[in-house]
Image: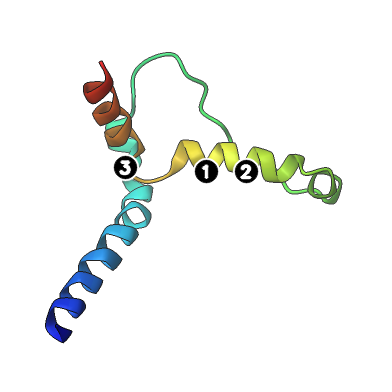
Amino acid sequence: MNKTHKILSIILITLLTLPAIRQPFNVLNELNGAYLKQEFPVFSYSDWKSLDFQNKTEKCVKDHFGFRPEMVRFANQVNY
């Protein structure tokens, strides 16, 4: 049980960290099509207080996480 638990833990940690490791190399597999890529927002205290900074950052992170192109292609293959 202990050995199986360690192996499953290592597999889980590896799967959770793969997108973070892959993120800097997303340049090679860009998606084609019509979508606007979000830019990283510039921090300002007024945007922080009005929650604009958080909303813009969330949109940017959703657009730039690791394996995004592969996940979109896979979802398109499954759904269509």
Assign a secondary structure to mark 2.
helix
* Kind of residue indicated by mark 3: Phe
**Residue labelled with disc 3:** 67
Asked if residue 46 lies left or right of residue 11, the reply is right
Mark 3 is surrounded, within 10 Å at the Cα level, by few (under 14), some (14 to 19) or many (20 or more) other residues, namely some
Measured from the top left, where is residue 13 in percent x and y?
Answer: 29, 67
Measured as percent of width and height from the top left, residue 54 is found at 69, 46
Residue 37 at what x, y percent from top left?
A: 51, 28
**Separation of marks 1 and 2 at Cα, in angstroms:** 6 Å
**Snapshot quadrant of residue 59:** top right
Badge 1 or badge 3: first in the primary sequence: 1
Q: According to the image, label 1 marks what residue?
A: 61
Type of the residue with mark 2: Thr
Quarter of the view holding residue 14: bottom left
Q: Mark 3 falls on what kind of element?
A: loop
| Callout 1 crowding tier (Cα within 10 Å): few <14, some 14–19, many ≥20 | few
Label pair 1/2, CB-CB below 8 angstroms: yes
| Labels 2 and 3 touching (C-beta < 8 A) | no
Residue pointed to by mark 2: 57
Residue 20 vs residue 73: left or right?
right
Locate the N terminus by quadrant.
Answer: bottom left
